[in-house]
Image (spheres, coloured by chain):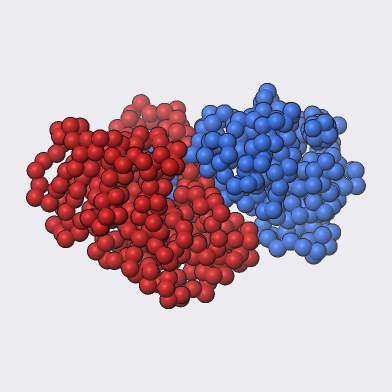
Chain colours: A blue, B red
């Protein structure tokens, strides 16, 4: 039985979608049990009795806009997210799933669970949608501004193992985000990381990856330092938003707007938005810790959250962390 | 009379669209004269007599895929682009316009024309489309990998003057591309650049700009080092391509596809593509040289190229370089 600790109060649509998503996951997967932490009065309308569900009251929770992290974060011992992380730290659960504020989750799990000894840095690896539909990890999207080449290589190993074990990608290819495809392109960190990836026994190296191909390449792992990958992630978001806005305006202006456009476009844009969301595949990995931590999308629906739980379950079931340790130990 | 040197053979659609675009510009603007350099046999079908047009034969030209630059580049003295740049260097023209390969244009104009003494680096500043439709400069998109904060500030001053003089933006706002909006975010270069921009008399500082807002903010100058801005530019391109592909697929799949979709969508996507092109506004600035150099888009149509010429003409007419020198000298 895989034991999951759920932050019942994290996410824009918490606690409703989180509670319902947890119940959905319990029904979808019969080898999991969940402990959900949150305000029992607020969660009550959505809770149902389930033989594999425990509910634990948490008096507090973090605001979704919370970005300031520090000593006080860890002192919020009665916050739903901290209680869920503590449950894992204490060995009572195998993994945490939270749709709460990203910076808080990274900070708190870093200091409570600690990095695995084979990795000195922690990366955040969201799944990005590609044109082909296969999942790709973008990392480090979380902001290790002073990462070194060897940290990036560790991240690449982690993401490769996770893709193979959880998403059935047989030989995940690691692409190094760069301003040109030729070896030798980029900054010192890029040139050095290129050399390390090329020769690494646990990595299938795609080579340098220009972001104009980033969603349309063979690469499964989209790798860069925390500054650059964060900029890439946010530029994707900004561009997709701009394209959507410009397209809507163009269509409104068009001849056909008064005819089929209303219904037609609403449907197309909705599906499009779905393609660009992480609902189908799960959440972002917090990679590098000694336990599995999954950051579900802030606006997770029940279904999306149940896929975040699925991802956590698979990570534990397939012993991704053990395999990462093994791959890093051997190299 | 403003004298322009035109690379007649640069661009995917050269020489046809370049020659036609030059003739179009001569008809649109009566205070310019042009010297076009290129293979006269290849250009002949599109050339027309014009009192303000001179044609000079150039035996060679650079392939659009040319990326390797070095000593041999400058030895191609009979290449159309080199001849056009040389014409400006010799004081026979006031500005160069080329749709040829970017790296070659930057390299050759850097070594032939030289940077202005107030700036030690040269940046490339493409115009990017924003949701509101106003033009914004993204720079340095060209790859000054080892740029320092003071170089970025020089770039910002140049772009601000150009926006004010050429595009009538009264108080161009400079946004520093960063992973967060708070001061203190980012790498050392970002933190230092933030301080310099904040206090600069010739700059209206917007603050840090997260790329998720990059096409939807008040900022007119989107500033970062050559690595980061190049990554941003290419990520925009890659994302727009992916969004287009996913949207097309979704629409094909949709219920309405057999009805109005064909015509309807073709029109909307075409307009959308146009919004995302630089046709309407001109080309990229090569900023920091002692003369005006405009890089028209590689796939320029005649109309787009004539707007690149318009931009060069305005840069000369409004003495942008003199005003930049003045602004940098005072600071």
The residue drawn where x is 19% and y is 42% is: B56
| Horizontal and vertical percent position of residue A222 | 61, 38
Residue under the image location 32 percent in, 57 percent down: B292
Q: Residue B273: percent from the left, percent from the top?
A: 35, 41
What percent of the width, then of the height, locates residue B130? Answer: 40, 54
Towards the viewer: A32 or A105? A105
Q: Is residue B223 left or right of residue A165?
A: left
> For the view shown, which residue lies furthest in the top direction?
A170
Tell me what residue is drawn at x 45 percent, y 38 percent: B68
- Along the line of sight, the residue nearer the viewer: A112 or B25: B25
Q: Compared with residue A151, is residue B29 higher up or lower down, i.e. above or below?
A: below
Percent coordinates x, y for residue B245 in the rendering? 45, 33
Would residue A266 be visible to someone looking at this image? no
Report the quarter where the C terminus of chain A lies.
top right
Query: Image height check: is B268 above or below A227?
Result: above
Q: Residue at horizontal 48%, vertical 36%?
A: B242
B126, above or below A301, in the image: below
Q: Quadrant of residue B327?
A: bottom left
Q: Is residue B149 visible?
A: yes
Query: In the image shown, does A230 or B163 lie closer to the viewer?
Result: B163
For residue B81, above or below residue B256 = below
């Amino acid at each position: 039985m895989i034991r999951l600790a759920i932050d019942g109060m994290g996410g824009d649509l918490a606690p409703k979608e989180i509670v319902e998503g947890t119940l959905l996951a319990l029904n979808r997967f019969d080898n999991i049990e969940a402990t959900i932490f949150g305000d029992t009065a607020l969660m009550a309308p959505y809770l149902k009795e389930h033989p594999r569900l425990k509910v634990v009251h948490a008096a507090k929770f973090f605001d979704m806009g919370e970005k300031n992290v520090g000593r006080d974060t860890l002192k919020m011992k009665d916050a739903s997210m901290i209680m869920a992380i503590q449950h894992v730290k204490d060995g009572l659960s195998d993994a945490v799933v939270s749709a709460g504020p990203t910076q808080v989750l990274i900070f708190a799990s870093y200091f409570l669970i600690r990095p695995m000894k084979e990795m000195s840095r922690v990366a955040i690896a969201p799944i990005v949608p590609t044109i082909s539909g296969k999942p790709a990890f973008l990392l480090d999207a979380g902001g290790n501004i002073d990462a070194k080449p060897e940290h990036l290589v560790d991240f690449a190993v982690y993401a490769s193992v996770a893709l193979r074990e959880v998403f059935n990608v047989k030989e995940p290819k690691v692409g190094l985000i760069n301003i040109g495809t030729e070896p030798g392109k980029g900054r010192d960190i890029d040139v050095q990381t290129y050399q390390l990836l090329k020769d690494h026994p646990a990595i299938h190296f795609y080579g340098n990856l220009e972001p104009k191909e980033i969603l349309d390449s063979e690469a499964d792992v989209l790798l860069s330092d925390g500054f650059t990958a964060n900029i890439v992630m946010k530029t994707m978001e900004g561009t997709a938003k701009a394209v959507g806005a410009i397209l809507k305006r163009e269509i409104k202006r068009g001849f056909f707007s008064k005819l089929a456009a209303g219904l037609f476009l609403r449907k197309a844009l909705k599906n499009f938005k779905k393609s660009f969301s992480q609902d189908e595949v799960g959440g972002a990995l917090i990679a590098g810790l000694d336990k599995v931590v999954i950051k579900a999308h802030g606006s997770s629906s029940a279904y999306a959250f149940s896929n975040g739980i699925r991802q956590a379950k698979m990570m534990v079931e397939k012993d991704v962390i053990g395999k990462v340790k093994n791959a890093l130990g051997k190299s």
